[in-house]
Image (cartoon, helix red, strand yellow):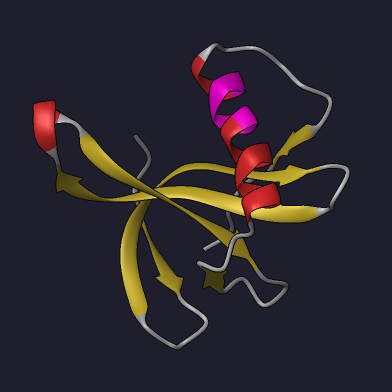
Amino acid sequence: MNSMVNLTKQNGEKLQAEIISYFEIVDTQKRYLFYTLNEAVENGLVKMYVSEVSDSMNIADNITDEEWNKIKAVMKSILTNSNSVQIKYLKWED
C-alpha cells in the first residue's frame, strides 16, 4: 500500500492513515477516500474506512444510503480491476 498520510476529520480529530484509493463519483462531483488505520480484523484482514472529502480536504463520515450504494459499486470496480466512466481517480495531496 501507500505511505502514511495525515488526515483531519471535520471535528478536528487527526488521524495517520494509509490511503487505499481517492476518487470522485462523476455524476455527483463528490470526492471519497478509502483508507486504513491498519487495524487487524478477523481472517487476517485489515479494516478499511470510507469518508467523503470536503473542499477543505477534511474527511466526513456522514454518507447517505444512496451514496453508499454508489461507493459499493466503486469498490466492486476496484476489486474487479474494471474501469468506469463514473469514477475519476484522484491523487491525494497531503
Q: Quadrant of residue 54?
A: bottom right
- Left or right of 29? Residue 77 is left
Residue at left offset 19%, top offset 31%: 45
x and y percent of residue 35 in the render?
41, 49
Residue at left offset 66%, top offset 43%: 23
Magenta stretch? Answer: 73-77
Residue 74 drawn in magenta: yes
Residue 3 drawn in magenta: no
Extreme-right residue of the structure:
27
Q: Quadrant of residue 71?
A: top right
x and y percent of residue 26 in the render?
84, 42
Q: Please state the total of marks drawn on the protein image.
A: 0
Task: Look at the magenta stretch and give its main secondary structure.
Answer: helix
Q: Is 79 rendered above or below residue 35?
A: above
Residue at left offset 56%, top offset 68%: 62
- Considering depth in this image, is 52 or 70 the residue closer to the camera? 70
- Considering depth in this image, is 47 or 14 the residue closer to the camera? 47
Residue at left offset 64%, top offset 59%: 64
x and y percent of residue 56 in the render?
67, 77
x and y percent of residue 57 in the render?
61, 71
Extreme-front residue of the structure:
65
Q: Is 19 rendered above or below residue 64?
A: above
Extreme-bottom residue of the structure:
12
For the N terminus, the quadrant is top left
